[in-house]
Image (cartoon, coloured by chain):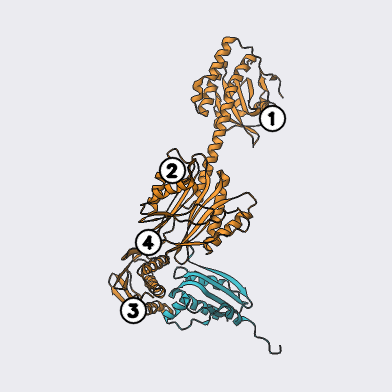
Chain colours: A cyan, B orange
Amino acid sequence: MTLGDLHITHAPGAVVAHLVGEIDMSNAEDLGAAVIGATPNEVRGVVLDLSHVDYLDSAGIWIIHGMRASLLARGQRLVLVIPPRSPVYDTLRLSGAERPGEVVEELDAALRAFEPEPSGDS
Amino acid sequence: MGSGQVALEPAEPILDAPDQVRSSYRFSDPALSELRIDELLDELLIRIQEALGVDTAAILLLDAEAQQLVARAAKGIEEEVERGVRIPIGRGFAGRIAAERVAIFIADVDHADILNPILREKGIRSLLGLPLIVEGQVIGVLHVGSLRARTFGPNDLAVLQLAAARAGPAIERAQLTARLEHEHNVSTALQRSLLPKRFGAVVGVTVAARYLPAREEVGGDWYDVIELPRGRVGLVIGDVVGHGVAAASLMGRLRTALHAYAIESHGPGRTLELVDRFVQSLNEPAMATAAYAVFDTYSLTVQYATAGHLPPVVISPSGARVIDLTPAPPLGAFPYGRCPEHEFSLDREDVLFLYTDGLVERRGIPLTDGIEALVTAVRGAGSPEEACVAAVADLVPLTGLRDDVAIVALQNSPIPAELKLRLPAEPRTLAHVRRTIRRWLVERGGGATEVAEVTIAVSEACANAIEHAYPPAPATFELRASCEYDEVTITVRDTGQWRPPRGENRGRGLSIMSTAMDHVQVDRFDEGTEVVLRRRLSHR
């Protein structure tokens, strides 16, 4: 069985990385590198969808911070999708971590964050 | 074509009576029937050499695909077989015999006409050969040769015809047997290669399986064990209608399709529906029965779907019973088939036993009696392995099976109340630790939230042990767990050096442990580090 997995989709202005399964020190680094590798310079950022992650530990939190730093260095944003009471939410609560970046509860909200601002004269 | 090459009409029966009897006997000796094909051909060639006083005798067989004759047995020119001489049909001495289906005599060999270098090297002067014909088909060529110039007459040809009449059918039979054996071996090997050999260790379950081929032909039975996310494990049994390589090959495709849909986390009903659509999409007549069970090691229930398959048996410490479920139609039977799901519980130590019809179907005995015999056979089995052994011992006839049999059995195996594990200090151990601890906590009556929280704390403690244990420290660590008056105590002990958390984020492991547990204690010894975690379970 594959412990955790990643699939990438594309939304206007953003790469959407859907993580599923379990993320721990055995796969966190590779998954993080895969997300960064799948992110071209042209997009404005990454939506990291953690809604379907069954398990995430401190190694996962560490990697999320690493991803945010890598993206920031390229002037890109990281928006996390973490529904309340999901396993990732619980890990963050236990770790006492301040929100590891920009967090929304639903994927739609994350996608909206990358939509172009309506222009003033429309 | 060279001079002196004569096509002969089939020989008239002009042998005198004693000669004919002697020659007939030479080649129809019942003792020859005892010989295997290679020995028989050798013996026939020796007898031909004696009867005709020739220096060489050889049999070449037709390779129909290549349209070539291949040397199969030879006397006096043994190199012919060793070197695997091949003669194209229609060319050279033997090639013409096969193409024109006539006996040919060459009194004085014109070496330009001889393709076979060995005949030339040997200095053969005269040759006589005839086609081996079985049921109107040329299957090869038999020829004899002489080192001195010699005229082969009708008597010689008649003797050779008697030998050919003996050799032809024997060769045909041997080739048929070899083909059948080959098909049987291929399909058995295929079948075996398509079935899983090892199962990953799933915490809280024990699994055993069998595949028994039929006496005559391989079939399309299969089983599978699939580890699924969130503490679940899938168990598959299936049976493709039909036999032989085709059934085995379809089985391989269905097993793969089912496995692929299953790991996408479709439930058993939807998984079988998708496999049904897959069967419908094949442009070939294909039908199979299958059942797919998903055992949840946390809820201790089985989700079950069956497409025309025989009912499962559950073996409990108190006895064994058939789980009666209405099956959906077989896979490939009707377009847009629906496959409902059933649920039943699998209590501690219960064994779920899945099988194919070859195990319970006997000519002249009602199927229900066969299933009843199975229930009787496996009653009292304390493990999946014991259940397989009992079923095979009681139900498989000593004379072999008419139909192949697949069995797969899974036990809800409780894990000990006190755990003491020595584990490899590798990152991939963590997933195993979490499954073990989760299952252990569920069995201690832990509620969903506390199970999740304790599990992450233990996984963090083990992650530390794995980080400390990198070389040159020994690459194992110890995990102990016990529960007293609702308080769980989990100890993780490594033999490496405790390293203070490095960096802001690396320290999170420790804060997770502290928040998730009532009590966390880290002790550093010369020989390693011990982390003790305690929490009182509130069962919520």
For the question of whether residue A58 can be seen, the reply is yes
Chain letter for mark 1? B
Q: What element carries label 3?
A: loop
For the question of whether residue B115 can be seen, the reply is no
Q: Mark 2 vs mark 3: tell me if same chain.
A: yes
State the residue position of label 2. Answer: B396
N-terminal label among 4 and 1 = 1
Q: Which of marks 2 and 3 is in front?
A: 2
Q: Residue B133's x, y, as percent?
A: 63, 26
Q: Which amino acid does label 4 sit on?
A: Arg
Q: What residue type is labelled 3?
A: Asp
N-terminal label among 2 and 4 = 4
Q: Residue at x 54, y 76 (%)?
A: A48
Q: Pointer 2: residues within 10 angstroms few (<14), some, or many (20+)?
A: some
* Image-quadrant location for residue B499: bottom left
Q: Pointer 4: residues within 10 angstroms few (<14), some, or many (20+)?
A: some
Q: Is mark 2 on a helix, strand or loop?
A: loop
Tell me how far mark 4 sits from mark 1, CA to CA: 75 Å
Q: Residue B360's x, y, as percent?
A: 46, 46
Q: Which of marks 4 and 1 is in front?
A: 4
Q: What element carries label 1?
A: loop
Residue contact at pointers 2 and 3, CB within 8 angstroms: no
State the residue position of label 4. Answer: B348
State the residue position of label 3. Answer: B518
Q: Residue B458's x, y, as percent?
A: 37, 72
State the residue position of label 1. Answer: B90
Q: Pointer 1: residues within 10 angstroms few (<14), some, or many (20+)?
A: some
